[in-house]
Image (cartoon, coloured by chain):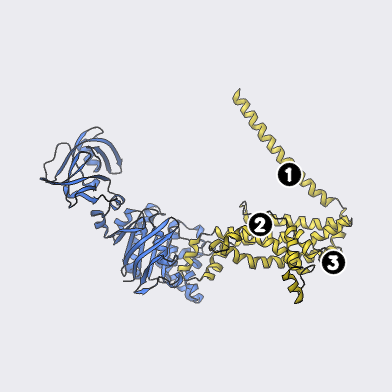
Chain colours: A yellow, B blue
């Protein structure tokens, strides 16, 4: 009797958990499907091919690719240094690269705004004729600032997982420090690099808070896809807002698939 | 004298090297024996130039290379787990060192072919490391280290990851390398068996110190410390008190009197090899000074040998062939006589 009860309570519990998971998945699917199905297909296509959305796509693509490139150039050496060497600021650096996990991008945005705006440095830049705030460059700066810690984090954990003995062997075979990095450590972390770059790019495409504060939301000037979504929802232009949202959603799904493909079930963030 | 190590010390985490002095001769196959954690791998890595020593110096052909970077030392290293670059083919793995020297692709290809034929791995060149067996991976790792013609080759536990048959084959191959290639080899291991079967000059390492250097026979016959004795398989180790008597040197342990040959007096440690114990049913009349009456407590049969544990006040372990065990009809609880020579007792000062 007791055993029977245990078996029943076991399957009851299991059934409940599976039902709960199923309901949640259904809820997610309904919400996203609802978004795409809300406007009639004709006006969605029209919105997607409107000048404003095409501009937003183009601006988002170029800025995110440039910022991802800069992220890679900076993050790779820094991540390698953090993984392999102990130096005076490595502990502090470890904290800093964890910060964006909890820091709202809006806060990063306002800090950047002060730094490039009224601060001594910002005033100096303006004096020598470099304007960052409310320009296309600001978009790249904001995306870089928010994303580079992520990429450093991903790459550091990738470098950490390369057994240093591979590098020792390479050195006994005559490889220089940079030779070891380019011929052993980096190629052995190739998968993490590809996955990291994909997720960095996707985050850059979707970056809103920091971009809004540093680059502003000027129609047809600093209007990336998330900004387009924001501007059009503010003016009640639902079709255009949903068009940008749809593109962002598709990018997220594709990124996720690529990430899962390269990284499988390994969790690195 | 290709390699001289002088007063080398290094601390790395929990591992230490303490005042290591070693000289490796030309074409020598030198074995360093020690338990895990003795600092063997650190020693190799410091010789290779991976770590900078805290103190001491390393000389190669009379030139101080203590501060020369690893890539310019011309000292090769093969790790226990081979460390083949997983993103490169076998050919690229072996050619890695030549590529660093900026040689032409054609020249690299030729050298890789040569060394691969020597080691019997030519058929593997286009494969990827993860498709190779342990023995194949090891030969590739050796080829990769040898192809740049190092002055000294360091082998970190080269045999312990292999199965018994491959291990025996590989051991013979390795032993021939110095005469075949003209390099010196340092081989570290925690198997005393490697010491016996390779049979070259060896050192025993413990707690970061080199505790004994010599030929394996010498190390086995005449261990300098109780650690070396225990590590080289001396089963019977006891502490006792040594003193002179009218019968010569006597060691008293647990009220058992043992005859020994030693100049030591007072508290000592002493050991007797299992194979030096002679078993008999009746007291033996012989020149051997020690005859002890004992009770058999346990018999453990392994292959053609039987390990017999007896209690004579001390718990001794002896080894017999199965044939002798049956001839003597020795069984649990039987009374037997144990005979061994005074000179079979190795005595150490009990300073630790």
**Distance (Cα) linking label 2 and label 1:** 30 Å
Mark 2 vs mark 1: same chain? Answer: yes
Report the residue marked by disc 3: A220
Mark 3 in CB contact with mark 2 (< 8 angstroms): no
Mark 3 vs mark 1: same chain? Answer: yes
- Mark 2 / mark 1, whichever is N-terminal: 1
Q: Tell me: B105 left or right of B252.
A: right
Check the image and name the residue furthest to the top. Answer: A1
Report the residue marked by disc 2: A99
Mark 3 in CB contact with mark 1 (< 8 angstroms): no
* Image: B159 above or below A23: below
- Mark 3 / mark 1, whichever is N-terminal: 1
| Circle 1: element type | helix
Q: Tell me: B238 left or right of B131.
A: left
Q: Tell me: A201 left or right of A95.
A: right
- For residue A243, which quarter of the picture? bottom right
Residue A235 position in % (x across, y down): 89, 57
Report the residue marked by disc 1: A25
| Circle 2: element type | helix
- In the image, which disc is placed on residue B210? none
Query: Is residue A191 visible in this depiction of the protein?
Result: no
- Mark 3 / mark 2, whichever is N-terminal: 2
| Circle 3: element type | loop
- For residue A43, which quarter of the picture? bottom right
* Image: A33 above or below B333: below
Q: Chain of mark 2?
A: A
């Amino acid at each position: 009797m007791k055993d029977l009860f245990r078996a029943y309570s076991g399957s009851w519990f299991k059934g409940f958990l599976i039902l709960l998971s199923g309901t949640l998945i259904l809820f997610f699917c309904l919400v996203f499907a609802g978004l795409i199905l809300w406007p009639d297909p004709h006006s969605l296509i029209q919105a997607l091919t409107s000048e404003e959305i095409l501009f937003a796509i183009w601006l988002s693509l170029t800025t995110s690719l440039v910022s991802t490139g800069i992220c890679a150039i900076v993050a790779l050496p820094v991540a390698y240094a953090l993984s392999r060497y102990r130096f005076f600021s490595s502990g502090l650096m470890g904290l800093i690269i964890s910060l964006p996990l909890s820091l709202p991008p809006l806060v990063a945005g306002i800090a950047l705004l002060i730094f490039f705006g009224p601060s001594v440095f910002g005033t100096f830049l303006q004096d020598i004729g470099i304007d960052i705030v409310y320009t296309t460059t600001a978009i790249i700066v904001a995306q870089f600032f928010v994303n580079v810690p992520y990429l450093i984090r991903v790459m550091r954990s990738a470098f950490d997982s390369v057994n240093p003995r591979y590098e020792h062997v390479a050195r006994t075979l005559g490889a220089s420090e940079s030779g070891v990095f380019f011929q052993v450590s980096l190629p052995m972390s190739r998968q993490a690099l590809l996955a990291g770059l994909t997720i960095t790019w996707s985050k850059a495409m979707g970056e809103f808070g920091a971009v809004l504060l540093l680059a502003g939301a000027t129609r047809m000037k600093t209007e990336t896809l998330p900004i387009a979504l924001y501007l059009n929802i503010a003016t009640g232009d639902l079709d255009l807002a949903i068009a940008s949202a749809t593109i962002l959603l598709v990018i997220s799904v594709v990124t996720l698939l690529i990430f899962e493909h390269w990284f499988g079930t390994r969790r690195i963030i | 004298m290709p390699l001289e190590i002088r007063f080398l010390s290094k601390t790395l985490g929990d591992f230490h090297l303490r005042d290591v002095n070693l000289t490796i001769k030309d074409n020598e196959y030198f074995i360093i024996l020690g338990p895990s954690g003795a600092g063997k791998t650190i020693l190799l890595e410091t010789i290779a130039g991976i770590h900078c020593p805290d103190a001491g110096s390393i000389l190669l052909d009379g030139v101080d290379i203590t501060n020369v970077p690893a890539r310019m030392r011309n000292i090769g290293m093969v790790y226990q787990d081979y460390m083949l670059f997983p993103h490169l083919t076998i050919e690229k793995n072996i050619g890695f060192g030549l590529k660093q020297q900026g040689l032409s692709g054609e020249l690299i290809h030729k050298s890789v072919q040569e060394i691969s034929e020597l080691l019997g791995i030519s058929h593997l060149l286009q494969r990827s490391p993860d498709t190779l067996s342990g023995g194949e991976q090891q030969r590739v790792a050796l080829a990769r280290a040898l192809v740049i013609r190092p002055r000294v080759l360091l082998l970190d536990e080269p045999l312990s990851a292999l199965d018994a048959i491959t291990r025996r084959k590989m051991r013979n191959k390795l032993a021939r390398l110095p005469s075949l290639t003209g390099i010196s080899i340092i081989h570290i291991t925690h198997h005393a068996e490697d010491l016996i079967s390779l049979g070259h000059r060896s050192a025993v390492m413990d707690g970061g110190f080199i505790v004994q250097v010599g030929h394996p026979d010498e190390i086995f016959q005449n261990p300098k410390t109780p650690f070396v004795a225990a590590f080289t398989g001396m089963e019977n180790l006891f502490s006792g008190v040594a003193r002179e008597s009218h019968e010569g040197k006597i060691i008293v342990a647990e009220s058992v009197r043992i005859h020994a040959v030693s100049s030591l007096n007072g508290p000592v440690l002493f050991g007797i090899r299992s194979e030096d114990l002679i078993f008999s049913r009746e007291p033996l009349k012989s020149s051997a000074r020690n005859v002890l009456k004992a009770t058999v407590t346990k018999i453990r049969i392994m292959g053609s040998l039987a390990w017999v544990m007896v209690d004579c006040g001390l718990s001794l372990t002896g080894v017999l062939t199965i044939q002798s065990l049956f001839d003597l009809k020795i069984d649990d609880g039987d009374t037997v006589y144990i005979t061994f020579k005074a000179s079979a007792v190795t005595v150490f000062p009990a300073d630790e």
